[in-house]
Image: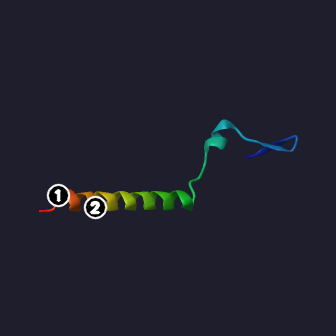
Protein backbone atom coordinates (compact mmCIF):
# COMPACT_ATOMS: atom_id res chain seq x y z
CA UNK A 1 0.00 0.00 0.00
CA UNK A 2 1.35 3.40 -0.96
CA UNK A 3 0.74 6.33 1.37
CA UNK A 4 0.79 9.99 0.39
CA UNK A 5 2.18 12.71 2.60
CA UNK A 6 2.18 16.32 1.45
CA UNK A 7 1.67 15.19 -2.15
CA UNK A 8 4.67 12.82 -2.10
CA UNK A 9 4.57 9.04 -2.28
CA UNK A 10 5.86 7.37 0.88
CA UNK A 11 6.92 3.71 0.89
CA UNK A 12 8.45 1.43 3.47
CA UNK A 13 12.08 0.36 2.84
CA UNK A 14 10.88 -3.12 1.83
CA UNK A 15 8.44 -1.68 -0.70
CA UNK A 16 11.11 0.63 -2.12
CA UNK A 17 13.52 -2.29 -2.67
CA UNK A 18 10.90 -4.55 -4.30
CA UNK A 19 11.79 -3.81 -7.91
CA UNK A 20 10.56 -5.93 -10.78
CA UNK A 21 13.12 -6.60 -13.52
CA UNK A 22 11.55 -5.70 -16.82
CA UNK A 23 12.18 -6.97 -20.34
CA UNK A 24 15.25 -4.76 -20.69
CA UNK A 25 17.04 -6.78 -18.00
CA UNK A 26 16.19 -10.03 -19.80
CA UNK A 27 17.44 -8.61 -23.10
CA UNK A 28 20.67 -7.40 -21.50
CA UNK A 29 21.32 -10.82 -19.96
CA UNK A 30 20.56 -12.62 -23.24
CA UNK A 31 22.80 -10.35 -25.32
CA UNK A 32 25.70 -10.45 -22.85
CA UNK A 33 25.50 -14.25 -22.56
CA UNK A 34 25.42 -14.59 -26.35
CA UNK A 35 28.42 -12.31 -26.74
CA UNK A 36 30.36 -14.24 -24.09
CA UNK A 37 29.66 -17.51 -25.91
CA UNK A 38 30.69 -15.95 -29.22
CA UNK A 39 33.96 -14.58 -27.80
CA UNK A 40 34.81 -17.89 -26.15
CA UNK A 41 34.07 -19.69 -29.42
CA UNK A 42 36.40 -17.38 -31.35
CA UNK A 43 39.15 -17.84 -28.75
CA UNK A 44 38.74 -21.63 -28.91
CA UNK A 45 38.79 -21.58 -32.72
CA UNK A 46 41.94 -19.45 -32.88
CA UNK A 47 43.99 -21.13 -30.15
CA UNK A 48 42.72 -24.67 -29.61
CA UNK A 49 41.61 -26.13 -32.94
CA UNK A 50 43.70 -28.97 -34.26
Circle 2 packing at 10 Å, graded few (<14), some (14-19), many (20+), is few
Q: Position of residue 47 (x, y in %)?
A: 19, 56
Q: Position of residue 24 (x, y in %)?
A: 55, 60
- Left or right, residue 49 beside residue 2: left
Residue sitting farthest toward the left: 50
Q: Position of residue 16 (x, y in %)?
A: 66, 42
**6 or 1: which is nearer to us?**
6
- Left or right, residue 4 beside residue 13: right
Residue name at image x 53 percent, y 56 percent:
25
Give the residue number, with chain letter if any, for mark 2.
42
Say if 30 sits above or below 2 in the image: below
Give the residue number, with chain letter if any, for mark 1.
48
Real-space Cα distance between discs 2 and 1? 10 Å
Callout 2–callout 1 Cβ contact below 8 Å:
no
Residue sitting farthest toward the front: 46
Disc count in the image?
2
Amino acid sequence: MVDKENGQTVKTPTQARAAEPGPSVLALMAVSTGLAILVMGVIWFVFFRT
